[in-house]
Amino acid sequence: MSEPAKYTVAVRALCEFTAKQGDLDLRFTPSPTAQEGIAGHAVVTARRGDGYRTEVSLSGDYALLHVRGRADGYDARENLLEEIKTYRGKLSSMPENHRHLHWAQVRVYGHLLCAQFGLDSVNLALVYYEIGSGHETVLRETRSAAELQAMFDDQCRRFIAWAEQELRHREARDAALVALRFPHASFRPGQRQLAETVFKANSTGRCLLAQAPTGIGKTVGSLFPVLKAAPGQRIDKVYFLAAKTPGRQLALDAAATIRAADPRLPLRVLELTARDKACEHPDKACQGASCPLAKGFYDRLPAARAAALEVPVLDRAALREVGLAYDVCPYYLGGEMTRWSDVIVGDYNYYFDGGAMLYALAQEQGWRASVLVDEAHNMVSRARSMYSGELDRALLRMARAAAPSETVKKALTKVARAWGEMDAHAPAPYQLLAAPPEKLLSALQNATSTINDYLAEQAVPLDPDLQRFHFDALGFGRLAESFGEHSLCDITRDGKDTTVCIRNVVPAPFLKPRFEGAHSVTLFSATLSPWHYFADLLGLPESTGWVDVESPFSAGQLAVHIASRISTRYQHRAASLAPIAQLMADQYAQAPGNYLAFFSSFDYLEQAADLFTRLHPAVPVWRQERRMSEAERAAFLDRFQPEGRGIGFAVLGGSFGEGVDLPGARLIGAFVATLGLPQLNPVNEQLRARMQAMFGAGYDYTYLYPGLQKVVQAAGRVIRTEQDRGTVYLIDDRFGQPAVRELLPRWWQVDTLSASAP
């Protein structure tokens, strides 16, 4: 007879579940960074005697629970078990519910120690170490093994009903996934190949780059095989990450489709939304005295959590409904439900950025997570931005003006002085530095410490300009600590003001631990060629697989024409406008319907649209505007009706160049009047030089590959199903070059027009 399943829970997770109480309190406080916390622990333990043991592994059982963790330190001579907490400022300003949680943790460790080593009693201590002064405050108590046993049993009894429920859920989930069938009658062409490759990658614990054409059902074709692999590979969580809101909706729709195919499948799906979009009271601080949804948050959380489990798909609307029904913050309820959901849908940053919540939870909880990255051609630019940061001298001036004390003002004045010295050595409009300036970094560190000390003493909100500069300085300092070949440091001058930037160009060193920390990561998109570009820049493991999925579409569905006698180079743009307008008008007259016309910038778009409207006023035209709202973007797309006629003008690489689904007669053609090459400027030229030095492919990695990815994405809006028919014009003579032609989809049959030159 097999042993009953055990539910493993970390000491911290057990205590957070059973001992957290009171208000949600997330006001900005000058808490130590992770590195400062580690250093603080090291200082405290170094002060102890030779017999002092650190990171003591402890574990124990209660019924079906297996509780485990690492105590910070134990002195056998004093029979003293310590839990070390680092902080800044006044200990008295620490919320009481934090202290309550800390005592719960050290008492659980105390019980596990007594049980593991047969002790009758143990001395317990909470050691609070103030980072700035190095001062320790020690709170001590002595507990008998029997007392600690009773406390531990009480904690476990309060958790065990939840644990039993979670075990039943996991068993039912895995049993249903073993029997799960594909949610459609058959696979689309190409979809089976994708699904089989994703399943193999998850079955072998490898990463995968999957180039798969638009329209084959990539979302279902990637999520379904991961779920099928989950029981055999003991996968705890599936993270589906998208670059934009439409991608998240596709994932939610795919999960709903899979659930609908087997109503008995107990699959919990959660959508994570950015705080600024989920916040009910943006004018209030995240703490009980200000926000009613933070007041008593942890007291009402158990009921809200139980109610949330009854909702199969916790999207943004469902989370809001549950949160408001129980008077808890929907955003932080979503954060809590990540622990109890099977499929979590969110933005890239939840797993890949420096403070990524999903990555941290996976490491802390020991989850086996499979990560799906949609539209992964965006990962290079998004990851670069995650690990870049800048400081603006104009903001420094505003921060100095808002300094709340003379001490803070002096510290910011030192930053200004160091900045002035840096500027004196960089008089050019743009200048690359060998490294972040040491004097500036020293002044910034002093300023952020001074502001932290002020906050610790006063506990009052900072002026918005000062707070923004403080956060920018903290981020800049963290990036400076890891500065290397993967980043550039530069100064850009705009009149009398300058901006200093640490600009990541190769995210690989930062992303590598993210790939290693997952059971498997699958990155998929219609444009992932060439594979080595993504492997080099993202830091994919050497064992990463690659698949180029066969297209379900035929060359006969899409007429692709190269207008090779028109140049869209910057110096030729004025001359290109009339030939482009004529080409578009001729195609529209030949086949009236809905078209998209893509240009490299808003200026180019506006010039082209103005001329076209003037020359061909009978053709309906609508344009992408700068900084469109969600409603305005929806209205733009609503113009593409099956019986509609006209041309929508859009910017390549913008909102309408990818992630837009306009099947059938909603879109019958596209004009792409650019190669999409990034702008030629000093920053990109430095990027090109670094790509050449590191990979021997400066032009390709900086200009050609990113540009052609945008082009293929834009053209991919035209053919969405096997029934679609359409036309694409690639407008520029460079599209005829062999190196460019090689980057176009294999299934395209391309011909060259013999139009007259501009």
Image (spheres, rainbow, N blue to C red):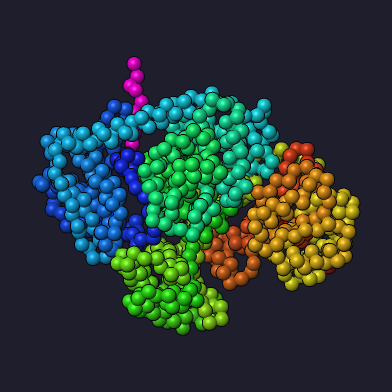
Task: Indicate whether residue 108 is drawn in magenta.
Answer: no
The segment highlighted magenta reads 1-10
Please state if 104 lies on the left or on the right of 276 as rendered.
left
Residue 287: image x %, image y %? 39, 55
Q: Residue 661: tell me if it is visible.
A: yes
Q: Residue at x 74, y 72 (%)?
A: 571
Q: Nearer the viewer, residue 159 or 530?
A: 159
Above or below, comparing residue 130 to residue 495 in the picture = above
Rendered location of residue 193, percent (x, y): 62, 34
Q: Residue at x 54, y 56 (%)?
A: 382
Q: Residue at x 32, y 59 (%)?
A: 32
Asked if residue 7 lies in the magenta stretch, the reply is yes
The residue nearer to you, when weighing 414 against 330, is 330
Quadrant location of the N terminus?
Answer: top left
Residue at 87%, 50% (x, y): give it. Answer: 592
Q: Position of residue 503 (x, y in %)?
A: 50, 65
> Which of the 4 quarters of the picture holds residue 685?
bottom right
Assign the magenta stretch its main secondary structure: loop
Total number of numbered discs in the rendering: 0
Whether residue 334 is visible here, answered yes or no, is no
In the rendered image, the residue lying farthest to the left is 77
Quadrant in which residue 208 is drawn: top right
Q: In the rendered view, would you say 471 is above or below 517?
A: below
**In the shown orientation, is residue 198 left or right of residue 154?**
right
- Residue 107 x %, y %: 22, 42
Observer-nearest residue: 227 or 303? 303
Instruction: Name the quarter where the C terminus is drawn.
Output: bottom right
